[in-house]
């Protein structure tokens, strides 16, 4: 029995700047073995096309990139501070080499649309609406932004509708 309760997007009372930029999130997507997850510390939430959306950024060399490209749904899950080591591990190791859930002793939950983890405090189930690669030509503040890239490894931005919110 899960401790989660479904709430509306308007009931999220967490600061999104803290959730994404400070606390970080796990981006989780189905794969042939169950699921794969990676840590994200860039992103945002807002309204686009009259829908509540999440903005997620993934580099093409990440294992998760290929998986998310082939799935319509994924989850963003947020954790209490005691899970910081889990987030560090999931952000520094590849799903090509590790079963991150097993290594971190976190419990996958398989929602009908996308997997997430029982240990999360807040979960956003997202449906991809739009994807576009970032590129140097579109960067206006080049001196500030380009220091985040080593060559041509720009992120792909996903704009995804938040279709379900689960809160502990």
Image: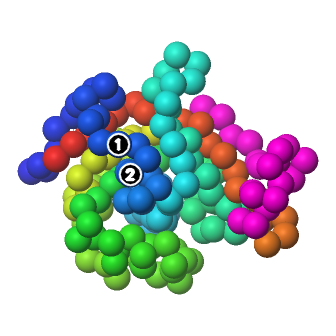
Task: Let me know if residue 161 appears in the view.
Answer: no
- The residue identified by callout 2 is 18
Q: Nearer the viewer, residue 27 or 45?
A: 45
Q: Which mark is residue 116?
A: none
Disc assigned to residue 15: 1
The residue range painted magenta reads: 128-148
Q: Are marks 2 and 1 in contact (CB under 8 Å)?
A: yes
Q: Is residue 11 above or below residue 45?
A: above
Residue 123: x and y, percent? Answer: 32, 46
Residue 29 visible from this viewpoint: yes
Name which quarter of the figure residue 79 lies in: bottom left
Tell me if mark 1 has few (under 14), some (14-19) or many (20+) residues whose alpha carbon lies within 10 angstroms of its own. Answer: few
Q: Residues within 10 Å of mark 2 (few under 14, many from 20)?
A: few
What percent of the width, then of the height, locates residue 34? 40, 63
- Give the residue at x 26% y 77%: 105
Q: Secondary structure at mark 1?
A: loop
The residue drawn where x is 51% and y is 25% is: 47
């Amino acid at each position: 029995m899960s401790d989660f309760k479904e709430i509306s997007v308007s009931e999220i009372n967490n600061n999104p700047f803290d959730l994404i930029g400070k606390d970080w999130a796990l981006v989780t997507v189905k794969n042939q073995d169950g699921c794969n997850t990676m840590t994200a510390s860039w992103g945002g939430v807002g309204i686009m096309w009259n829908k509540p959306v999440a903005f997620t950024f993934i580099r093409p060399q990440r294992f998760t990139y290929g998986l998310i490209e082939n799935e319509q749904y994924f989850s963003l899950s947020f954790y209490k501070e005691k899970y910081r080591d889990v987030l560090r591990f999931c952000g520094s190791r590849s799903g090509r080499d590790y079963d991150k859930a097993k290594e971190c002793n976190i419990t996958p939950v398989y929602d009908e649309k996308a997997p997430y983890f029982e240990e999360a405090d807040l979960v956003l189930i997202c449906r991809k609406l739009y994807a576009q690669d970032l590129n140097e030509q579109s960067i206006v503040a080049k001196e500030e932004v380009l220091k985040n890239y080593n060559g041509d490894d720009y992120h792909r931005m996903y704009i995804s509708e938040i279709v379900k919110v689960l809160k502990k």
